[in-house]
Amino acid sequence: MGKSVVWDLDVRVFDQLKIMKTIKTDKDKLKYFQYLLEANPVIEAQYEEYFKDRGGEDKGVLAVDHVVRFMQSEFDDCLAQLRNVNLCDIDIRDYVPQRSGYIDHDEAMEHLVEDQLKNIVHPFFEEISREMNGGETTKALLKFIAIFDACKRKDVYDPEALYYEISSFLWTELFYFQSRLVEHLKCRVLPQSLTENVCNALFLNYLKYHGEDERYLQFFEPLLMAITISEDSTQLVEKLIRQYEIKRNLIPRFCSYLSFLGNDLEGWIRESEELIEYDGDIAQKVLQYYAGNDEKKFVRIAKKLWYKGLYRGKTAELYFKEIDPVKEPEFYKQVVLHLIQNEHREEYYRILQGLFSEEEKEKFIEKNKWNCELYAMMLHMEGRQEELLDHLRSDKYLIDFAKMIPYLYHSHPVESLKLIKEYILDRLSDRKYRRREYPKIVELLQSTHMIKGHDQKINELIRIVYYHQPTLPAMRSKMEMEGL
């Protein structure tokens, strides 16, 4: 994430706190605790923050208008800075390389843009860190929500159409910073007023500015889970969800978590099944529960999700392990078909060979000609290397040539090296697009070491590429980095 945000809480503090369990008298415990507070300002700040909340039911709860004004101020500050970013003003001469080796113009520009954005958001992150350590956790979390909104609603002057990259970069920065926040919140004793203040702010903000964005609240689910840790806070949050009329499918993982905190297994299962179509993690947990407890319900839910096209990437492996191919032959076949088209493992194709008729198998092979690596693997397993060789000879522009050709290394080593040489020289002859091919070419050259007994020809090929004329500095740099 670039420059890291400083957190002052030393892990040794937890070891110091454990010592209290070994102290016998209350008097000595209090004396030792006093020493801990004096020696650890961060712990002292947490102690003071927590006991601000102990004076009454509403102690520490901020007025809604105060929360709104504070967040608006932080939002305006961050947004104004983001709007001052002008990508036309970036001067490539200011670039300081972040790594050794050749760096092309586009990558250098990307780094410069990212540096500008980091210079804006990282100071806010550091302020949040200081406030957390100073016992102002509520203020810190409200500021984080405001910064997120500013990054989401920015208007950067962007004549080069880099909006997607900018948005993606900022989202990643915010995502990883929230992960750090969550880890530190888990190590803290939090007042209940903090939970109420943050939920008030977040739900109000959603309703006022993001009512059309069904994924807005989901970003903050890890934060909500970190600040809701007790039965009292769970009841409070449930009340606020009802009060603000927040649909539970907008925060599915959090609502499932709230049911789990209630220590009511039936309630958790009921809640999670209602939300299963809105979150892949919930789906996995429910399926894993039923896999060991109720085969019929497992199959029912698995089929429901599968035929709606939900979470196949997350759940297909579990289905493959748990579904009985005798009881559910068609469903099992669909799962294996999905897995082989995405993972290209020989294990799956061997299973399909037993499930397919000869006619079905041929149709499947022909249908997947576009899936180059899978097509090559299937021809290899069928012993049809000559057919694969003819296919590669006839089409020198295959996108996945580098993934297909290794299937011929054992049966046709000389022909493989000849095809590789032709493929590489063809790519290097295209001045306009050859740079984007460099990683593929290096990967291809590395793979040739799997060809046994032809070291001289392989080294000759590597030298031809390295000493290519005209000279290609970026190509040479990548080859050297990979030890070629």
Image: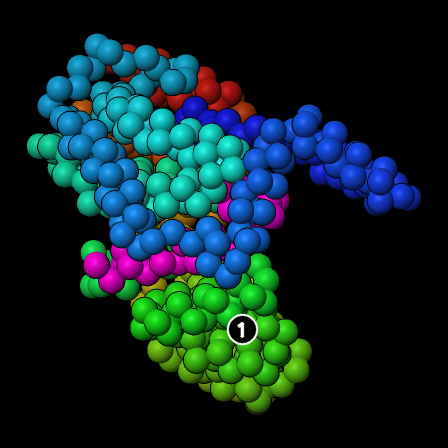
Where residue 64 sits in the image (x, y, percent)? 31, 55
Is there any visible trace of residue 336 in the rendered image? no
In the image, residue 473 above or below residue 445: above
- Closer to us: 422 or 96: 96
- Please identify the quarter of the rendering in which residue 364 is found: bottom left
Apparent side of residue 198 relative to residue 92 in the rendered image (left or right): right
Prevalent SS, magenta region: helix
Look at 61% across and 78% down and name the residue there.
264
- The residue at the point 23 percent across, 23 percent down is 109
Q: Amino acid at mark 1?
A: Ser
Q: Is residue 196 magenta?
A: yes
Q: Residue at x 35, y 72 (%)?
A: 243
Instruction: Give the residues drawn in magenta, as a range.
Output: 181-208
Quarter containing the N terminus: top left
Location of residue 200 in the rendering, given as x and y in whole percent from the top left corner:
36, 58
Q: Residue at x 29, y 42 (%)?
A: 70
